[in-house]
Amino acid sequence: MPLNKKIRELQEKREKVLLGGGEQAIEKQKAMGKRTARERIMSLLDENSFNEYDLFVEHDARDFDMDKKSLPSDGVIIGSGTIYGAPVAIFAQDFTVAGGSLGLMHSRKITKIMDHALKMRMPLIGINDSGGARIQEGVNSLAGYGEIFFRNTISSGVIPQISVILGPCAGGAVYSPALTDFVFVVDKISKMFITGPEVIKTVLGEEISMEDLGGARVHSEVTGNAHFFALSEEECFDQIKKLITFIPWNNGKKARVFEPAEPKPEYNINKIVPEDPTLPYDVKDVIRAIVDNSDFFEIMQLYAKNIVIGFGRMGGRTTGFVANQPLEMAGVLDVDSSDKAARFIRYCDAFNIPIITLVDLPGYLPGVDQEHAGVIRHGAKVLYAYSEATVPKLTVILRKAYGGGYIAMSSRHLRADFVFAWPSAEIAVMGPEGAANIIFRKEISSSKDPDGMRKQKVEEYKTKFANPYVAASRGYVDAVIEPSETRKFLMHSIEVSENKDVTMPAKKHGLPPF
Ligand code: HXC
């Protein structure tokens, strides 16, 4: 056959496969507000950068009349491309082909691109839109999932792994995203659950919609499974692209360095923390007053809002931020905020990203609910994550740093490299009111004017302990600084930490309180 004819034959074969599940299925996909798998890849990657592999892979199932069915590309598209020039490996499940269900060859395509991403040390992006294990393929589908989960685990901490949920992600399938670093969801489109509404109705007799069970909002606000929430696929892709600019390609590299830029003048760092220590303020304004361009890229914005995590740049370098949020529950540490912070700290540590911790918290949240929900076990994760992290650790105590909260929030004792405190810092075992009531109980109760005596003793305690100078006199705080000096001190600390080198004792692995 002449070459031209062969090329035409290839083109025709391609065109046929590129139609996926056919026009009707594509229309149905669009009617749900969803793009096709290929459109998604094209709009996420740099123009003309996508190289597709395994276009002609087909399933080889025989049962349930499957031998009579053709499933183009077996319902998943794989390949590699770039985002702002950064290489990425990608797969996207095609719901128009058998509901994006995962059979043996479908899973082999996914594991092929996962192996490729790990070998080439580049980020992996998985777009999930699938009815789960392909029922007709039985245990082969389960085997496929197992192979994916194994690779997610082995790649963890080596290459960034990003999951995008753009449709159903049902049954055991959810465990692949759950093992990855960042999960993106879109309102009304993402659905994630282990057992669907029908099973719940049958087994428990409870009625619940798919949205209320495992929609995008539920996973962003309630379960903490999702890290980024968007109102449209377009917004979601913009978030993914932005994330890619902040993280390195693999654990052997540092993130790309950008042109340094000053924070915007409207964030006046001297005026953010109120003089009255009982008043709240938005700690994100402090972050915006410190980072380049005042550009703070928040992660898990809607979950456990009493702690804030995310990326910003300091002098062009990616930096992770962990900050208590006085606007929410006075910024206490509880079960959920501990989980949120600990995982992020470990992410930064795995991927060579320095961590800045901003401290203002009254301590761990008291109460039976928290105790019984395991605040001891979950709270310990924060201590573990900070202690184990060897990336540069910089701490600024803005206001309250009481008790266990002081220790947990990247204190000198957990090997923070630099600890700074503002003059408004209050570093003590507990808050003045509680402390005075305990240590001056006798004086207060035997006084003719107990209220007056209590006030006097609270003031006494405040003067003596509720300040940064006791900690500074012991060297637990390296410098007491004016708020306006914060960026300068932090930039310098990051600069001198560039070649930080600490060695931990050899071990197979530690035992964090999972
Ligand atoms: C085979 C499937 C499928 C599946 C969907 N399809 N899910 N085929 N195996 N798991 C097919 C449908 O038969 C249909 O084919 C096409 O995909 C589109 O599906 P619809 O049901 O028409 O779409 P929709 O109404 O949008 O509903 C989507 C859905 C629903 C909610 C995902 O299809 C559904 O509930 N599927 C089953 C979900 C589930 O229970 N999965 C768990 C499997 S067990 P045609 O030919 O008609 O177009 C599992 C365990 C894994 O995953 C454990 C791993 C550890």
Image: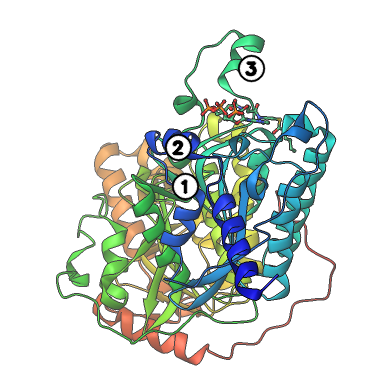
* 158 shown above or below 108: below
Distance (Cα) linking label 3 and label 1: 28 Å
Q: Is residue 35 visible?
A: yes
Circle 3 residue? 199
Location of residue 9 in the rendering, given as x and y in whole percent from the top left corner: 62, 62
Q: Nearer the viewer, residue 1 or 81?
A: 1
Q: Nearer the viewer, residue 475 or 73?
A: 73
- Amino acid, disc 3: Val
Residue at the location (62% across, 59% down)?
A: 78
Distance between the Cα atoms at labels 2 and 3? 25 Å
- Give the residue at mark 2: 29
Residue, x 38% and y 80% (percent of image)? 314
* Residues under numbered marks 1 and 2 in contact, where contact means CB atoms less than 8 Å apart: yes
- Judged left or right of residue 216, residue 152 is right
Up the image or down, 412 lies above or below 32; here it is below
Secondary structure of residue under mark 3? helix
Residue type at mark 2 is Gln
Q: Earlier in the sequence, mark 1 or mark 2?
A: 2
Name the secondary structure under disc 2. helix
Placement of the N terminus among the 4 image quadrants: bottom right
Residue 122 is situated, as x and y percent measured from the top left of the image, at 62, 73
Tell which quarter ligand 1 is in: top right
Residue bearing mark 1: 36
Q: Position of residue 242 (x, y in %)?
A: 40, 66
Left or right: where does residue 391 sit relative to residue 264?
right
Q: In the image, what residue type sits under mark 1?
A: Thr
**Alpha carbons under labels 1 and 2: distance apart:** 7 Å
Ligand 1 neighbours mark 3 (CB distance < 8 Å): yes
